[in-house]
């Protein structure tokens, strides 16, 4: 019989733009040690490891094998999953299936990146088809700008609407000691920051970071013994919709729409806006915070700007989004999706400290990739049926 | 451990050269572009969607496509941005000249978008829906560079 | 725990260079062959795992190239990086976790597009090792040397692995290098990295393989008689060569031990009827056999000479021709898995072995086999 699965511990590094004081294995180890401490477990208790990053940021082939001194994978099963920006959420979904299958009772899930070790835009550009896409592509930002332009043209949104999202996330980051960028900004500062790719200003986008995150998952057989209030995984979904970037429906995130509909259906959620209590969205730029919550069905098409201006997604609002400060404050790419998962788990477990949203029953976390793919997880306080 | 010196090991100019397969569909596309200045796409026999770049499989219908159609060369801007920050182009190792127009072009007759440069001489003209045409290279070699860029025509 | 079975397999021919085919073209061919083999349509598949390597493909998010051609549109999909046996492992857990019923697993690579030694050089640690210019061949040459030193295995015995496997490939229409060669031919071939001659090494190859894994509740609903997954495990050794005893592979021993235990196998030498194992280099077949307990320590070379591992022998090993006869990295383990599935179904054609109730498949990741994945497949549930 399939097992129900819960998150019983999380750990992350203090994320920085550059960590020359540690090599990759040591960075990974920082997160692993913290997750083990959080769950009060030892490495010998771990039955298997799932790890992920994006290869070309560090240029290390077979990271599963190379990482074992940091991950604790020596003489254990270790497997690597990688799907681009979605990787961090992909590895969490991997941990879920490894435990859920009954093959392993306790699985350690790791996402990491040392973005400082290469030119991030150059490395992301190599993500796209070498023959068709690569010549004109300019890293994740060019595709995102094309998405934002299309959304603006379709719904009449403005760059002020985008900037409002950035102001929110940067304010939230003040509550998170792990965030890389902890500086409040005003709407005017966002709009006055340099234009990178129309309509995206510098302060609309994420930084690049060095960081790692680790999450420990356990089956229903032991989860509640390890952790009195574990974070139960209710459902997962992933859509990797396109082979070529030009196939995308710019202005709408089809992968989020299809995936979230599946997620709500699996969990029996009818009104996500009312039933979900907090969202940790992999939102590397401000406009995604508008477009994608419409695709999630939180609000209708074109309605996100009003909803966000009214403060509904701020701390204390109806549905706080990115209490951690989100990706705009911290982005070690291969870890980023898993940080969303860990932050959502902390909200459910009541461990989010200064960024805690009260009484979280359901939390949503996601991973996003520049190819407009989305992976997602629904977390819950109660044990799933 | 007390913090002393942080040593960095540089990879230098180490590269991993690749010979990327274009495949039969792409080869036909680039040969037509090079020899006849024609833009070729494929149509799905089931959903009738016209795909560019041409490829074997319609992902929606999971069927093989063999129905070639000429599209463009004129089209409209599907969406775009203007890149204003400098970065290292991994294709050349040199800094990319900015600003440059980056567009998703919807060729007349095609259903998917084709990425390319858009001339930014007059930025005000660059809008979603603006009509564009390609400026072909004088020395075509059978690659994406056989189109130099697209320019707005009205 | 619930059970899962393999209910369909499909592979492209392994070739030196498939210059006419993109990754998507190869995936399209392998996936359709697997669906036809299983008697399924793409609508019968409820989730997809593609297996690829960003390094081998020369592209970050290499899985992006094959999604459409693997029928992943509107389905849950993900990507494993590493040998196909690891992709299949994850695919199996997705069929057992209660989330899905039928997982399509693919693996692809095209060695022809890159310079292999540069790709495998980047598997070495960038700080301490890479600048020494090591690659997979030199790493494995060192391992071969330490294995020979410990076990007294001879160059002739290693060469005989190559002779056997290239000979077996004569009966496998998908193999890249069917060859009728002698031990002398191997020993006279160019010395690549002492003690490995050219014919001790697998070739550079292109190929894609697909397998379909089903939860027990649907495993008998389709055309094929299911081949049951009885036991499976994987395990990684230390990374730095200096931390490992290169003449031993304790991660493989551990993975095999756990796979046998799960399958209820007490005496693998007697209970395993057929094996496809990761012979990227000739010595590896002998070394892996010993480490998995399919031959006693330091005896595999002698048993090979006796004919034990021939198609008609006590334990046919790499009856398909193995990876020495065609080695599309990443896809490799799925080719081995498909070969064992066909043996167990009695579909292996020219390389069918006499008795094939229980089979073993081995895949690996990393330099000199740092991480291993061992599968026990069986005719019976």
Image (cartoon, coloured by chain):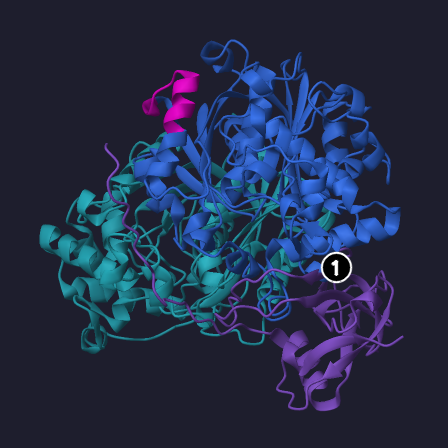
Instruction: Please indicate whether residue B22 sits to the left or right of residue C251 in the image.
Output: right
Up-down: is A317 above or below C116? Answer: above
User: Which is more toward the observer, A303 or A217?
Assistant: A303
Residue at image mark 1: A247
Residue at 64% over, 52% down: A194
* Residue positioned most to the right: B154
Residue C99 appearing in the image: no
Q: Is residue A181 within the magenta segment?
A: no
| Magenta part, dominant SS | helix
| Of residues B133 and B20, the one drawn nearer to the viewer in this rendering | B133
Q: Residue A177 at what x, y percent from top left? A: 50, 26
Specify start and end residues of the magenta stretch as a single range.
A32-44
Residue at 36% over, 57% down:
C318
Above or below residue A184? Residue A138 is: below
Tell me which corner region of the image, top left, top right, bottom left or bottom right, holds residue C254. Answer: top left
Residue sitting at x 44%, y 58% = C352
User: Chain B's colour?
Assistant: purple
Q: Does the magenta stretch include residue A36?
A: yes
Q: Mark 1 lies on which chain?
A: A
Q: In which quarter of the image is the C terminus of chain A?
A: top right
Q: Chain C is drawn in which colour?
A: cyan
Colour-to-chain, blue: A
Left or right, A385 with respect to A7, comes to right
C26 relative to A45 in the view: left or right: right
Q: Nearer the viewer, residue C202 or C242?
A: C242
> Please, is residue A10 above or below residue C194 in the view?
above
């Amino acid at each position: 019989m399939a097992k129900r699965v819960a998150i019983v511990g999380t750990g992350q590094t203090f994320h920085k733009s550059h960590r020359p004081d540690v090599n990759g294995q040591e960075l990974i180890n920082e997160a692993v040690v913290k997750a083990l401490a959080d769950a009060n477990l030892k490495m010998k208790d771990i039955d298997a490891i799932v790890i992920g990053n994006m290869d070309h940021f560090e240029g290390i082939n077979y990271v599963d094998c190379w990482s074992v001194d940091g991950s604790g994978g020596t003489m254990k099963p270790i497997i690597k999953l990688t799907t681009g920006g979605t990787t961090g959420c992909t590895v969490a979904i991997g941990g879920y299936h490894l435990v859920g299958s009954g093959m392993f009772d306790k699985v350690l899930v790791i996402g990491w990146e040392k973005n400082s070790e290469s030119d991030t835009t150059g490395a992301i550009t190599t993500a796209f088809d070498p023959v068709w896409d690569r010549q004109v592509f300019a890293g994740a930002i060019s595709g995102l700008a094309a998405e934002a332009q299309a959304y603006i043209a379709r719904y009449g949104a403005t760059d002020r609407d985008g900037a409002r999202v950035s102001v929110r996330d940067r304010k939230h980051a003040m509550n998170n000691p792990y965030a890389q960028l902890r500086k409040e900004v005003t709407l005017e500062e966002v709009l006055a920051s340099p234009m990178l790719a129309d309509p995206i200003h510098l302060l609309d986008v994420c930084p690049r970071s060095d960081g790692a995150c680790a999450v420990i998952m356990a089956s229903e057989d032991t989860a509640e013994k390890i952790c009195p209030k574990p974070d139960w995984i209710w459902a997962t979904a992933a859509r990797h919709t396109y082979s070529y970037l030009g196939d995308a429906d710019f202005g709408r995130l089809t992968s989020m729409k299809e995936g979230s509909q599946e997620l709500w259906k699996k969990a029996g959620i009818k009104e996500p806006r009312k039933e979900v209590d907090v969202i940790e969205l992999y939102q590397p730029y401000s406009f995604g915070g508008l477009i994608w919550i419409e695709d999630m069905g939180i609000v209708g098409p074109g309605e996100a700007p009003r909803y966000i201006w009214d403060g509904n997604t701020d701390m204390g609002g109806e549905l706080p989004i990115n209490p951690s400060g989100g990706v705009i404050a911290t982005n070690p790419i291969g870890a980023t999706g898993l940080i969303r998962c860990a932050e959502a788990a902390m909200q459910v477990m009541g461990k989010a400290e200064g960024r805690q949203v009260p009484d979280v029953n359901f939390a949503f976390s996601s991973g996003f990739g520049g190819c407009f793919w989305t992976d997602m997880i629904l977390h819950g306080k109660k044990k799933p049926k | 451990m007390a913090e002393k010196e942080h040593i960095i090991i540089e990879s230098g100019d180490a590269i991993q050269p690749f010979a990327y397969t274009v495949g039969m569909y792409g080869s036909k596309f680039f040969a037509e572009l090079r020899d006849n200045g024609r833009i070729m796409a494929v149509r799905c026999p089931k959903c009738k969607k016209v795909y560019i770049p041409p490829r074997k499989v319609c992902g929606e219908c999971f069927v093989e496509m063999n129905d070639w159609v000429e599209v463009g060369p004129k089209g409209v801007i599907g969406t775009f941005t203007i890149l204003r920050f400098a970065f290292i182009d991994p294709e050349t190792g040199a800094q990319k000249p900015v600003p440059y127009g980056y567009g998703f072009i919807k060729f007349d007759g095609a259903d998917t978008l084709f990425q390319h440069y858009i001339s930014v001489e007059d930025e005000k003209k660059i809008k979603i829906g603006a009509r564009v045409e390609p400026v072909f290279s004088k020395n075509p070699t059978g690659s994406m560079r056989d189109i130099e860029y697209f320019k707005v025509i009205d | 725990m619930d059970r899962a079975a393999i209910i369909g397999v499909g592979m492209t021919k392994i070739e030196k260079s498939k210059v006419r085919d993109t990754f998507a073209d190869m995936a399209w061919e392998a996936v359709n062959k697997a669906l036809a083999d299983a008697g399924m349509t793409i609508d019968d598949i409820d989730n997809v795992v593609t297996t690829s390597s960003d390094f081998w493909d020369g592209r970050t998010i290499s899985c992006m190239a094959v999604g459409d051609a693997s029928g992943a549109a509107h389905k849950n999909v993900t990507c494993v990086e590493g040998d196909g046996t690891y992709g299949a492992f994850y695919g199996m857990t997705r069929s057992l976790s209660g989330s899905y019923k039928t997982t399509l697993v693919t693996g692809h690579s095209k060695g022809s597009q890159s310079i292999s030694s540069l790709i495998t050089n980047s598997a070495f640690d960038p700080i301490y090792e890479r600048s020494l210019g090591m690659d997979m061949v030199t790493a494995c040459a060192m391992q071969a040397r330490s294995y020979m030193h410990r076990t007294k295995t001879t160059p002739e015995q290693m060469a005989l692995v190559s002779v056997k496997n290239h000979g077996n490939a004569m009966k496998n229409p998908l193999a890249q290098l069917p060859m009728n060669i002698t031990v002398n031919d191997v020993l006279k071939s160019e010395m690549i990295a002492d003690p490995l001659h050219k014919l001790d090494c697998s070739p550079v190859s292109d190929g894609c393989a697909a397998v379909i894994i089903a939860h027990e509740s649907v495993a008998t609903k389709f055309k094929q008689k299911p081949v049951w997954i009885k036991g499976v495990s994987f395990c990684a050794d230390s990374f730095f060569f200096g931390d490992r005893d290169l003449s031993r592979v304790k991660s493989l021993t551990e993975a095999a031990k756990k796979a046998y235990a799960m399958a209820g196998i007490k005496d693998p030498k007697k209970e395993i009827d057929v094996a496809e194992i990761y012979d990227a280099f000739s010595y590896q077949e002998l070394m892996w056999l010993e480490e998995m307990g399919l031959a006693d320590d330091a005896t595999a070379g002698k048993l090979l000479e006796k004919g034990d591992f021939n198609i008609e022998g006590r334990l046919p090993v790499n009856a398909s021709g193995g990876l020495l006869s065609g080695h599309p990295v990443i896809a490799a383990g799925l080719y081995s898995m498909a070969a064992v599935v066909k043996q167990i179904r009695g579909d292996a054609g020219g390389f069918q072995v006499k008795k094939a109730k229980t089979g073993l498949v081995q895949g690996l990741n990393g330099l000199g086999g740092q991480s291993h994945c061992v599968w026990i497949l069986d005719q019976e549930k």
